[in-house]
Amino acid sequence: MNGVTVMSNKAMSNETGITVPDGCMMNEKGHFVPVDKVDAIDKLRDETVVDIFNSAKTLSEQVAQTKKQMFAKLFDFFDLSAMEYEREWRNPKGNVSVPSFCGRYKVQLSVSKYLDFDERLNVAKDLTDECISEWSEGSNDYIKELVLEAFKVDTKGNLSAHKLLGLLKYKFDNAKWEKAMKVLREAVHVVGSKEYLRFYQRDEHGKYHQLLLDFSKL
């Protein structure tokens, strides 16, 4: 069990800056406990948890490095492909799918935008609320529910940009509704974006299946 003490000491020193004295283990209260005072099952639990955590941390670092290399390789290819037409590759506005020659494999570059709304969202809400109150009972009930749902906040106080922008596709011959949608368009801002890579393999029936990299789904 001596290896347990050494592993825990190193983990504590590296992660917290606290050096655990030789012959001791640090408990969850930060107290140094002599190894011979620690039950065997507690030592084994510590060894198991630290070993699994270290393996996960190593894997996480490897995945991060591999991800960086994959993006670099894909963007290098995009640059070369654009040069075929004497153009420069520009970051995509949407998703880009790249198949293998045989079509069995596919790499997809997905771009997710982070949206935020300024103070004009409150104006848009006031206008839509007025529309709802003015519509006669029984008319546009479906839209009423959509509007109420779109402006509903979650448990963290956040609104769904997807639901809010979904209102824009509904057209009515109503000046107030049109004004509300105009204000809603002007209130939204793209505050950032993130790129993802997804990997697909086609089966014998021609259907693509995503390669799972989510640890919880494997």
Image (cartoon, rainbow, N blue to C red):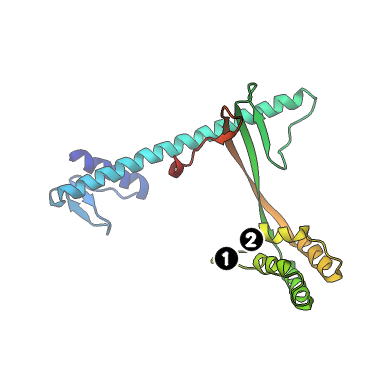
Label 2 sits on residue: 160
Residue 114 x %, y %? 65, 53
Please provide percent x and percent y for residue 143. Answer: 73, 66
Instruction: Tell me if label 2 and label 1 are in contact, CB under 8 Å.
Output: yes
Q: Mark 2 and mark 1: span between their CA atoms?
A: 8 Å
Is the N terminus in the top left, top right, bottom left or bottom right quadrant? top left
Q: In this view, does 156 lie above or below 197?
A: below
Q: Residue at x 67, y 60 (%)?
A: 163
Which one is in front, 179 or 166?
A: 166
Between discs 2 and 1, the one toward the N terminus: 1
Q: In the image, what residue occupies the spot 67% across and 65% down?
A: 150
Quarter holding residue 78? top right
Q: Measuring 75% from the left and 62% from the top, which residue is drawn there?
A: 187
Classify the position of the C terminus by image quarter: top left
* Residue 30 located left or right of residue 1: right
Q: In this view, does 173 lie to the left or right of 149?
A: right
Secondary structure of the residue carrying numbered label 1: loop
Indicate which disc residue 154 carries: 1
Q: Position of residue 20 (x, y in %)?
A: 25, 48
